[in-house]
Image: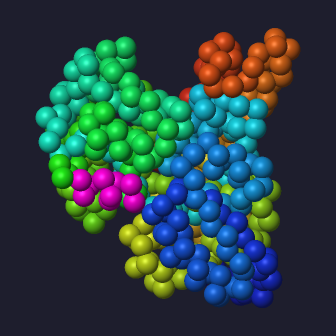
Amino acid sequence: MKASRNYRKEYKWPAEYHMITWLGTPVIAAHSWADLLAQDTGMKMHIGGTTMTVNRFRWLRSGLSQQTEGTPSETSQMVMADRRYAVRDGGPFPVRVLWIKSKGNATFFTRGDSKIKTPHGIKPGTRITDMNPYVAATRVVDGLLAWAQVKHEDIVWVPVYNSDDNIGAVVEGRADICFSMPSTTQAARAATNPFGLSCVELNAEADPEGARRYRQCDPLINFGIIPKEVLPAIGGKWGTQGLNLEFTSAREPAEQVYQIARWLDENHERYKDGNIANLFRTRQWLMKALEETFVPVHEGLKMYLRDLGLWTAKHEKRDRKNLEILNGYITEFQKIIWAADDKGLDLVPENEEWIHFWESHRDKTLPPIKLWANLEEE
């Protein structure tokens, strides 16, 4: 099935296009398809990477980039202005879905000689990396502790300051557990240490009650088996999984987004083998993700899906609901920033008074961000 508006093939592509992704392997993955797009269109593609999730969204918001990626968990943290996102130029903004990126996995890594095999192996005194100095990852760890039924204050927290330091703390024996993605270059490198790598298995089938407790802390997490192709050391074990999306800003031209979506769709056979993440960059996985996501769809992508006959009244109804919720967060976050200014508060994540001021207002005023079960869910 192809889009019916053949005249769109005459579209004049912009001279350049800017993307920011995770540093390391995801930059390579982006080049695996974007270099082909550049060849076909004459656009100069600029692809940068960073380990600072907060900055990826801030730069998309400000216009320094036109496209970035996001997992459901980190995207929800941005929309809800969780901790590190709770800064004047952070938090929610008119973000939009452009296409699907991947079906992603993450896990709680341990060193290969660790005795911690499941969440129930976590006890008071277990050392877990504290990633708050560089990412907002509180809820994923809270979920693990809820599964393990161990209190936050009984854990020994090991501050880490970037992705290398995070998994390096486990390899070097400074920490017992860290949360990371097995697809990164850091994980591949860490797996070559003399002890190897293992993980805390999150087997939701074997322990559904533990999984339920986890999802009470983070309703954006699902669980599944990590493919062996991603990282052989932990392939076949249970971790978290989700459908990760490519995002753009509402200000990007609809015709531009239409053409990028169309190119990604119609050229999948050409780039699918360039990187394992590309296997899921299909229209079919996109439609699945649109049943779940809480992020509004860009008008250009809607135009493309309408041309294919795939955008239904149910999709439109869900999209309007997502837009209503996102706009509510944007409005209330700006209101509370002004109110905080009136109180003379310093709007930095380290200021507990500011964080409490925003989060107490948010939790009383706004609905929680969650993944939808399907298009029928209200």
Is residue 186 located in the magenta-colored stretch of the structure?
yes
The quadrant where residue 121 appears: top left
Q: Is residue 308 left or right of residue 332?
A: left
Q: Check the picture and name the quadrant holding the C terminus.
A: top right
Pinpoint residue 236: horizontal percent, then vertical percent.
Answer: 20, 55
Would residue 56 be visible to someone looking at this image?
A: yes
Name the residue rendered at 72%, 86% in the picture: 42
Name the residue rendered at 39%, 28% in the picture: 158
Q: Is residue 51 left or right of residue 39?
A: left
Pinpoint residue 367: horizontal percent, then vertical percent.
Answer: 60, 27
In the image, is residue 328 above or below residue 223?
above
Q: Which is the main secondary structure of the residues drawn in magenta?
A: helix
In the image, is residue 175 above or below residue 56?
above
Q: Check the picture and name the quadrant holding the N terminus.
A: bottom right
Pinpoint residue 147: horizontal percent, then vertical percent.
Answer: 28, 27
Name the residue rendered at 69%, 25% in the picture: 348
Would residue 306 be visible to someone looking at this image?
A: no
Viewer-side residue, 360 vs 309: 360
Is residue 319 located in the magenta-colored stretch of the structure?
no
Query: Magenta residues?
Result: 185-193
The quadrant where residue 214 appears: top left
